[in-house]
Image: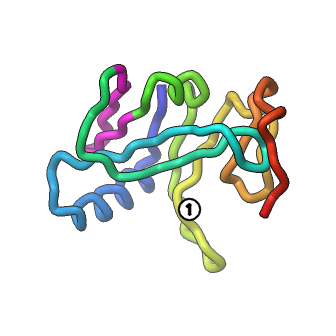
Amino acid sequence: MITITDVAANELKRLLAQQENPKVALRVFVSPGGCSGMSYGMAFDDEEQEGDEVLQHDGVRVCVDEMSAMYLGGSEIDYVDQLMGGGFTIHNPNAVRSCACGHSFDTGSDAESARPCS
């Protein structure tokens, strides 16, 4: 389903420790919109939803809802630390194109919902 690099897992462990709630997991999702048709999203969540796919990597839990799992299968979550801004990134083999911002993608069937970059 989704994999997490060791670098991303270490950064997630650091951020999750700040939440001071052992039930908190990273929720990864996609939603319609963005400049390429679909947008990535990540948030902390302390409740699993019915139908969630849950993965564990080195003590980090990641939840993905059923709809998002269709778009994210085979993806890798990584963390990039750069001088001019870094952060989490998703390498998605299902994306046929991505926006330069890296926050949205097109699988070939969702371009009709694309909107200009802001």
Residue at x 62%, y 42% (from the top left corner): 91
Left/right of residue 92 with respect to residue 73 in the rendered view: right
Look at the image and say whether residue 52 sits in the magenta stretch: yes
Left/right of residue 70 with respect to residue 116 in the rendered view: left
Image coords of residue 52 (percent x, y): 36, 26
Query: Tag 1: Cα neighbours inside 10 Å, few (<14), some, or many (≥20)?
Result: few
Q: What is the secondary structure assignment of the residue under circle 1? A: strand
Query: Number of labelled discs?
Result: 1
Look at the image and say whether residue 32 sits in the magenta stretch: no
Image coords of residue 80 (percent x, y): 56, 62
Image coords of residue 24 (percent x, y): 24, 49
Residues rendered magenta in the picture? 51-63
Residue 81, by quadrant, is bottom right
Name the amino acid type tagged 1: Val
What type of secondary structure mainly makes up the magenta span? strand
Residue at x 52%, y 56% (from the top left corner): 88
Q: Quadrant of the C terminus?
A: bottom right
Image coords of residue 14 (percent x, y): 30, 64
Left/right of residue 105 with respect to residue 9 in the rendered view: right
Colour convention of the picture: rainbow
Residue at x 52%, y 50% (from the top left corner): 78
Q: Residue furthest bottom?
A: 83
Image height of 82 relative to 100, above or below: below
Residue at x 46%, y 46% (from the top left corner): 5
- Residue under pointer 1: 80
Image height of 94 relative to 62, above or below: above
Q: Nearer the viewer, residue 57 or 50?
A: 50
Image height of 72 relative to 15, above or below: above
